């Protein structure tokens, strides 16, 4: 009896998430072997224990001047974690994204991590680059984020910042008492010549990217997360010209929902191909979970800006200047699903201002 | 015969004493760990850090295994309120996000009874959990919080 209860507890979450494997298996062919293993997660403590979660969203999008308004399947995402030993774990995030005539699948993150202690955790793989807050906080989990979409500066497929990074990462807590300081130091392949992509199959030049981020999660104010970071890389443009990229980022996030405040700032300098210029981007998001009987409702507001120098040799050709004011409402009608609607007043580069509307049903398949 | 002010003072003193007595009888939640865990006292901030999995190792580098009661138990409700300061929905979202960020390989182990909690704390090195102080057995170690035992006045988890 004792053993049965111990096994039940040990695999509590695993058992509850087995059904998610079925969902996940439909998401991406690329992860079929791993999921098959997950479906037969063993209660034997000596064998790897798999945990699977799934995220998905379905949206209705209405955009100014577009005759393609309508429903859209967003991303279907599977997250797998496996405990291979007391300190060794594997994490994977896989997505299937609806395109015009097909689904594209992607290995979003694949990380092998060894935890030596709270101070030293070493990993290798493909990450969401730890620049700023959003990119390494919400990943592809639309349900996790308050809003329908990520800020434009951290949008998937964005050229503004390197969303993905392939290499090694050392992270951990620093001895700092109640300050709760933590760090991340990364080294690896820089961006691909297609700067919206990471150097997944190898670095396109001999110059590796490196980054460092210092953060604080105060023990006294557990909801407060602040940090600064620096990222450096040399990018090779399609014509072969090298461009130095140096990015400074800073963020502050108050993650309690009464209120929730996230502020992020990024300044990126680019120098090469006979020109130099800077890009500045920021957003401020404010949300508030209504009290008591109305606490399923959470109104929110976000202001965003991206300003690219005309002389920026890397980004100016794409004209990514952007300004937006977003007003929305999230309704958590279920513990694992939310409906969000938002009005977006956006200005894209020289294209003028647009009034757009998005409605999104997002959900998570997980259990605790 | 006593005058009215004296009687009033007597009544107030009696009410105060009854309040103290009632407070002393409020059930305390004890934080229990495996016998070999290298810890005897934690501050509330340290405890919160462990329960949030911001701290995942004991001083001897044993990984901390957090055991949490299943939903709807009084102990879980108390801990969510006093330690996590979260609602049930926020608690779920917190752990889902934590796993999704690859900060932890798995969420807390879910236990369904006090007996099961005791069994697992005894069996799993590095484990930490919580239960009513009156349910604690000698097989596990009770950790002081801010230097106070569950039976002490001013114990913060009461």
Image (tube, grey):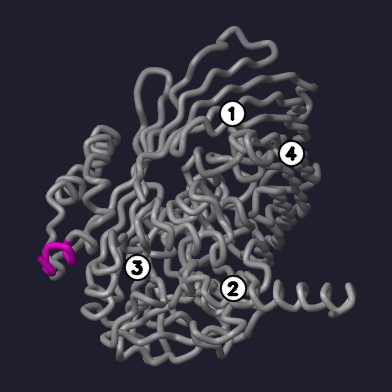
Q: Point out the stretch of residues depicted in magenta.
A: A1-7
Q: Are marks 2 and 1 in contact (CB under 8 Å)?
A: no
Mark 3 lies on residue: B67
**Could you say which quadrant of the image residue A44 lies in?**
bottom left
Residue B109: x percent and y percent? 31, 63
**Could you say which quadrant of the image residue B118 lies in?**
bottom left
Under tag 1, what secondary structure? strand
The Cα–Cα distance between marks 2 and 1, rounded to whole angstroms, is: 45 Å
The Cα–Cα distance between marks 1 and 3, rounded to whole angstroms, is: 34 Å
Question: As rendered, which of A151 and B42 lies closer to the eye?
Answer: B42
| Label 2 vs label 4, nearer the camera | 2
Question: As rendered, which of A317 and A118 lies closer to the eye?
Answer: A118
Under tag 4, what secondary structure? strand
Determine the residue positioned at 35% across, 88% down. Answer: B37
Query: Label 3 marks which chain's residue?
Result: B
N-terminal-most mark, 1 or 4:
4
Mark 1 lies on residue: A340
Mark 4 lies on residue: A302
Residue farthest toward the top in the current orientation of the protein: A67
Both marks 1 and 3 on one chain: no
Label 2 neighbour load within 10 Å: few <14, some 14-19, many 20+: few
| Label 1 vs label 4, nearer the camera | 1
A296 up-or-down from B5: above or below: above
Question: As rendered, which of A322 and B51 lies closer to the eye?
Answer: B51
Residue A88: x percent and y percent? 29, 72
Q: Quadrant of the N terminus of chain A?
A: bottom left
A28 up-or-down from B80: above or below: above
């Amino acid at each position: 009896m004792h053993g049965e209860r111990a096994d039940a507890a040990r695999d509590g979450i695993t058992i509850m998430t087995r059904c998610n494997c079925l969902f996940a298996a439909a998401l991406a062919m690329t992860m079929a072997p791993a999921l098959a293993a997950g479906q037969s997660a063993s209660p034997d403590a000596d064998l790897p224990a798999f945990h699977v979660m799934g995220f998905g969203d379905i949206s209705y999008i209405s955009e100014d001047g577009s005759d393609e308004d309508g429903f859209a399947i967003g991303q279907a995402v599977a997250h797998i974690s496996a405990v291979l030993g007391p300190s060794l774990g594997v994490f994977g995030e896989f997505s299937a994204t609806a395109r015009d005539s097909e689904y594209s699948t992607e290995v979003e993150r694949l990380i092998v991590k060894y935890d030596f202690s709270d101070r030293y955790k070493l990993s290798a793989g493909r990450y969401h680059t730890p620049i700023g807050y959003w990119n390494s906080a919400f990943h592809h989990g639309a349900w996790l984020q308050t809003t329908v979409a990520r800020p434009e500066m951290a949008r998937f497929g964005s050229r503004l910042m390197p969303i993905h990074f392939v290499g090694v990462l050392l992270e951990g807590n620093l001895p700092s008492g109640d300050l709760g300081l933590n760090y991340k130091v990364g080294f690896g392949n820089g961006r691909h010549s297609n700067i919206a992509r990471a150097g997944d199959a190898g670095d396109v030049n001999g110059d590796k990217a490196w980054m460092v981020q210092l953060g604080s999660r105060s023990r006294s104010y557990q909801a407060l997360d602040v940090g600064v970071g620096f990222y450096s890389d040399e990018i090779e443009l399609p014509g072969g010209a090298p461009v130095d990229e140096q990015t400074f980022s800073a963020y502050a996030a108050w993650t309690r929902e009464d209120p929730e405040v996230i502020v992020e700032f990024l300044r990126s300098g680019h120098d090469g191909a006979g020109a130099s210029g800077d890009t500045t981007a920021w957003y401020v998001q404010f949300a508030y979970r209504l009290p008591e009987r109305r606490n399923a409702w959470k109104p929110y507001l976000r202001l965003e800006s991206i300003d690219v120098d005309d002389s920026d040799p890397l980004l100016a050709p794409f004209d990514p200047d952007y300004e937006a004011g977003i007003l929305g409402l999230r309704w958590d009608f279920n513990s694992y699903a939310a409906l969000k609607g938002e009005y977006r007043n956006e200005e894209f580069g020289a294209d003028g201002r647009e009034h757009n509307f998005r409605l999104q049903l997002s959900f998570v398949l997980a259990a605790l | 015969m006593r005058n009215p002010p004296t009687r009033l003072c007597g009544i107030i003193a009696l009410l105060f004493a009854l309040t103290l007595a009632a407070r002393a009888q409020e059930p305390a939640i004890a934080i229990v760990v495996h016998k070999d865990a290298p810890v005897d006292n934690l501050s509330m901030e340290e405890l919160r850090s462990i329960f949030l999995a911001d701290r995942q190792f004991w001083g001897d580098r044993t990984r901390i295994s957090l055991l949490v009661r299943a939903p709807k138990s009084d102990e879980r409700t108390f801990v969510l309120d006093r330690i996590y300061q979260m609602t049930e929905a926020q608690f779920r979202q917190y752990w889902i996000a934590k796993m999704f960020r690859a900060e932890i390989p798995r969420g807390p182990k879910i236990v369904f009874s006090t007996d099961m909690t005791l069994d697992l704390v005894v069996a799993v090195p590095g484990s930490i959990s919580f239960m009513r102080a009156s349910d604690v057995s000698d097989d596990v170690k009770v950790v002081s919080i801010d230097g106070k035992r569950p039976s002490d006045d001013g114990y913060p988890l009461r």
